[in-house]
Image: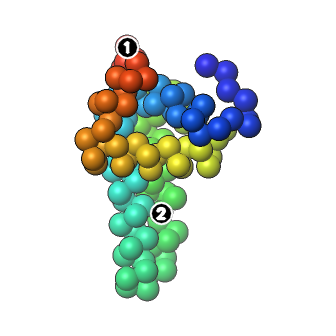
Amino acid sequence: MNLNRNLSFAEFWPYYLAQHSRPATRWVHLAATLAWLALLAAALGTRTWWLLAAIPVVAYGLAWFSHFFLERNRPATFRYPLLSLLADHKMAFLMLTGGMARELEQLQIQPRR
């Protein structure tokens, strides 16, 4: 799928899910999302500001690991940073609320071989 840079979130979302077709990739992304939120809460709660510097290292490190070694594709973050961030959070929400399977089925996303 060749996407232009000026697409809407609705147009980006199916592409994003196709790039996260393997369950292991989605679980690592969920861990990355929860990790950055926990680091933010810890930094704010304890006023330990260096934890803020750890957020991109931990979150992107986990997510990019999953792309390079599990999904074997290039992270969408490189071309669509804001849309990818929004999609990460939507995917985490769907995973936590049990809606991911329905979303994958509706968009006909199958794990890559």
Numbered mark located on residue 4 in the image = none
Tell which residue pokes out farthest to the bottom in this image.
Answer: 47
Task: Determine crowd level at label 2: few under 14, some 14-19, many 20+ residues with C-alpha closer than 10 A.
Answer: many
Q: Is residue 5 left or right of residue 69?
A: right
| Residue in front for this viewpoint, 10 or 27 | 10
Q: Residue at x 45, y 54 (%)?
A: 59
As drawn, 44 above or below 75? below
Q: Secondary structure at mark 1?
A: loop
Q: Position of residue 13 (x, y in %)?
A: 52, 34
Q: Position of residue 28 (x, y in %)?
A: 35, 43
Check disc 2 and give the amino acid type. Answer: Ile
| Residue in front for this viewpoint, 72 or 27 | 27
Q: Which residue is mark 2?
A: 55
Task: Determine crowd level at label 1: few under 14, some 14-19, many 20+ residues with C-alpha closer than 10 A.
Answer: few
Numbered mark located on residue 113 in the image = 1
Q: Is residue 103 left or right of residue 84?
A: left
Check disc 1 and give the amino acid type. Answer: Arg
Q: CA distance from mark 2 to mark 1?
A: 32 Å
Residues marked 2 and 1 touching at CB (< 8 Å): no
Q: Earlier in the sequence, mark 2 or mark 1?
A: 2
Q: Is residue 78 visible?
A: no
Q: Is residue 104 visible?
A: yes
Q: Secondary structure at mark 2?
A: helix
